Amino acid sequence: MIKTLKTRIRIILTKLLGKDFSNPSLTRLVRDSQVISFDVFDTLIIRSGLKTPSDLFDLIHPDDSTFKSRRIEAERKAREQLSLEDIKLEEIYKELYEDLRERQEVQEAMALEISTELSVCRANPEALEFFNTVRKVGKRVVITSDMYLNRPTIENILTNCGYDLTGVNVYVSSEYGKTKRTSNLFREVLREEGMEGREGEVLHIGDNLIADYISPRKIGMKSFLYNR
């Protein structure tokens, strides 16, 4: 009941605080920033035909009615067992298929999920246009994502959807074991981009109230809550 109430509050706050890419306040924020960070899923990228991210699992093995629940449970267990803030897809699949002792077998199982993910990902048209505009005006652009997929996979999704990542650094929680939600992945971005002590010159744009809007502000960054 408490979780449901919290979810409803977040939805309401997102609707109240969230704006689209045409909002004048975003133009001002970009103008006054040196580095612009973008979230990936539900910001730059839309999963076509899915109501929730876990609906993807229905498409991986459509003839197996148990796969979705087993995949969700495997991720839960993998997260419980590891002390890191985020995990890798490989760790989920080792939990899902304990009988797959050979690394090659695990890789093949994961490849099917990745190819299914790629098949549903589409560029958010207004985000793509804004992303290109930010690059044209000479701002330094980075990508920051809380996701169990690895960086090469995220880069592949983005480029397949039309994003030019030339000169764009991509930061993914699974590779650092740190998340946006705790602000720790943002700290890594600041460090690697040479922006420590200049947090107020970094703007992050994303759709999640906690991870994309509140967390960067906790460490002095600017943020813009996107609501499509």
Image (tube, grey):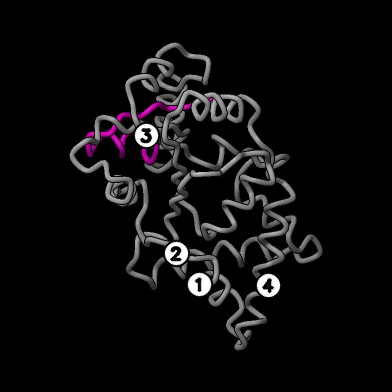
Q: Which residue is drawn at 64% across and 45% down?
A: 159
Q: Give the alpha-carbon distance from disc 4 to disc 2, as whole Å.
A: 17 Å
Give the amino acid type for the residue marked by disc 2 in the picture: Ile
In the figure, residue 129 lies in which quadrant?
top right
Of labels 1 and 4, earlier in sequence is 1
Which element carries disc 1, helix, strand or loop? helix
- Callout 2 secondary element: loop
Disc 1 marks which amino acid? Glu
Q: Return the x and y of residue 166 as percentages of the image width and height.
A: 55, 44
Q: Where is residue 125 in the image (x, y as percent from the top left)?
A: 65, 27
Q: Which of marks 4 and 2 is nearer the N terminus?
A: 2
Q: Label 3, secondary structure: give it.
A: strand
Labels 2 and 1 touching (C-beta < 8 A): yes
Which residue position is annotated with label 2? 87
Point out the tag, 4 or 3, that comes first from the N-terminus. 3
Residue sitting at 61 percent across and 78 percent down?
Answer: 97
Binning the other alpha carbons within 10 Å of mark 1 as few (below 14), some (14 to 19) or many (20 upward) gives: some
Q: Answer yes or no: do the residues labelled 1 and 4 have beta carbons within 8 Å?
A: no
- Residue wearing tag 3: 35
Relative image position of residue 194 (x, y in whole percent): 27, 45
Q: What residue type is labelled 4?
A: Ala
